[in-house]
Amino acid sequence: MADNEEHDAIDDLLLEQRKFAPTDSFKKQTLIAGTHLYDEANQDYEAFWARQADELVSWDTKWNRICEWELPYSKWFVGGRLNVSYNCLDRHVLAGKGDKVAFYFEGEPGDTRTITYSDLLGEVQKFSNVLKSLGVVKGDRVNIYLPMIPEAAVAMLACARIGAAHSVVFGGFSAQALADRINDAEAKVLITADGGWRRGDVFPLKQQADEAVATTPTIEHVVVVRRGNNAVTMKPGRDHWYHDLMVAADPVCVAEPMDSEQLLFLLYTSGTTGKPKGIMHTTGGYLTHVSYTHKYVFDLHPEKDIFWCTADVGWITGHSYIVYGPLANGATQVMYEGVPNFPANDRMWQIIEKYKVTIFYTAPTAIRTYMKWGTEAPGKHDLSSLRLLGSVGEPINPEAWMWYREHIGSNKCPIVDTWWQTETGGIMISPLPGATTLKPGSATFALPGIGAEVVDDAGVTVLKGGGYLTLTHPWPGMLRGIWGDAERYQETYWSRFAGRYFAGDGAKLDDEGYLWLLGRVDDVMNVSGHRISTTEVESALVSHPSVAEAAVVGANDSTTGQAIIAYVTLVTGKEVDEQVLRNHVATEIGAIAKPKTIYFTPDLPKTRSGKIMRRLLRDVAEGRNLGDTTTLADANVVLELQKRIADAPSED
Ligand code: WTA
């Protein structure tokens, strides 16, 4: 059964023939036009990374070993000492670049702020002292639950400055999801806001935070940024306004050098079981990896580029390519708070025109949404400042790639399709825009310094055709484990194929060695570029008193990549409305995990041993003919479901 499921996920019938070589004009100004980085890294990947660490990062004490690799744990730049916030801020200011803009912040309602590197350093030093005054010391965990506002970056960098690990929870997550993550990390302080802006309205954060903190005994203080101006209740002694603490804070906080392997942050991500995993990232290796990839994948010229990554800081993309990579490289960025269709469908293009953005990094789900909205919105704006486009989060289908190239990139910008994961810390597979001939829909090749191979079920390397994506040797930004669960770390990533990191993604190699990502092969769905575990949504559904059993699958969806489809069996004699259940999931996990459709069924298709056959449910949801049903305990269950779905009113 499992085999069938996996083969389903790695079949790919697409044959894409178009190719785009770097243009002469792009090659003229690019950092890397030839293959020398690949050649260097192939000679000795450790030495290659050491050179990057030397060139891109400032160290207080140099390391004495590049990499210690004891499967499945790696340590990088062992013995080295550095401070990440010093690297992202102080050194630029000391080099005379204090007046350079770090962020052009664009609030959703239209308010703006221009923040220079000096401004940011000032804020971060003060907030570091605020954290200290609240009792935060090196090694503590601090939770951050904020909208997309500059204070999110300030809070993260302040943690890094004093050696506390941050754990950022996306502002769209529910109180329950926040509480689970705080409790797992045993965080001491929570930083949140009254509310944030979304589609013209204020969404409350403090209220959710209050609900969470009611069940998180480790939280001693809550710091609240004023953003939404919505009414909040402040609990005396526990809750403090950010602006009150900041006026009283000492402006100087010297960056303390940290061990290269000091925990920098935890970031929770979905796995195949219900409990989210606290992915651990440390200091020296991570910073090296994100600054290297940010520089070469985006061909960064910090003196002239305006970089805009549209991710939320609550995801790894925001950590690595809004906060740490770009700031370490001294880049100037745009940070936008809100949605792409407020006040109108052209907001993104209007922002690109306004700030003359040169590098734009977004997700396929967003691109497909813009495609749906039509070419009129981008056509209204001058997008000629753009010179490079990027994509991340899920496979980008060739048609979306071509649309992006034509309508956003005026047929002249290279597109870097970047494959990576929360666990990898930074980009792993991607073109180098001045060196790689592109094929629409292919992430092309592993970056210099990275080892990636496709293997078959038996773990044998595949040179052409489909299989599982694995990583063959350690890299500096790799996760250092799962917080509090060493066994799960070993089991999830290192047990499927001996000596290799298993990413959970299917991939194929074409006859020219290009890599094509084919999506997840495990029970993790990818909805609008966000990883959501089927188990988590099932658990949320079953936690409703009327629900007896639930099975959740990700079905192909032309906009969101996958859509969450749930099959629910109710407790005998109980009834519940579909909308009520969808909202229940939103309360338990967050609105992003709401099933698109819920089908009620008296029974679920199961094998004789009682395992739910998700493959069949996916076939049913996608309207496919059913394959092998011989292992089903009761084939009528699926026939009945198919009938119901065919009869159901269409949503569109
Ligand atoms: C998927 C996001 C195809 C993949 C950075 C991976 C991609 C998961 C790509 C990680 C891409 C990410 N092409 N698939 N360019 N980028 N993915 O942890 O399934 O949120 O395993 O990290 O997203 O999602 P995560």
Image (cartoon, rainbow, N blue to C red):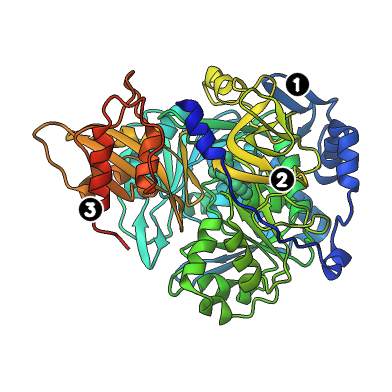
Compare marks 2 and 3 and give the one earlier in the sequence. 2
Q: Nearer the viewer, mark 1 or mark 3?
A: 3
Question: How far is mark 1 from mark 2, CA to CA?
Answer: 31 Å
For mark 1, does the 10 Å Cα neighbourhood hold few (<14), some (14 to 19), or many (20 or more) residues?
few
Classify residue 61 as left or right of residue 558.
right
The residue tagged 1 is: 69
Ligand 1 within 8 Å, label 3 CB? no
Secondary structure at badge 1 equals strand
Identify residue type, mark 2: Asp
Residue designated by label 3: 647
Closer to the chain start, of discs 1 and 3, is 1
Which residue is found at the position 57% from the left and 23% from the top?
A: 489
Question: Which kind of residue does numbered mark 1 sit on?
Answer: Trp
Decide: is 185 above or below 98. above
Which marked residue is nearer to the observer: mark 1 or mark 2? 2
Question: Does the residue at mark 2 contact the one at mark 3 (Cβ under 8 Å)?
Answer: no
Q: Which residue is at the front of the view, 92 or 22?
A: 22
Residue at numbered disc 2: 510
**Rendered view: 132 above or below 228:** above
Seen as rendered, the residue at the extreme left is 573
Q: Residue 114, image x and y in percent? A: 61, 67
Quadrant the C terminus occupies? bottom left
Residue at 43%, 74% (x, y): give it. Answer: 343
Q: Are marks 1 and 3 in contact (CB under 8 Å)?
A: no
Q: Quadrant of residue 258?
A: top right
Q: Quadrant of residue 381?
A: bottom right
Q: Is residue 331 above or below residue 291?
A: below
Q: CA distance from mark 2 to mark 3?
A: 41 Å
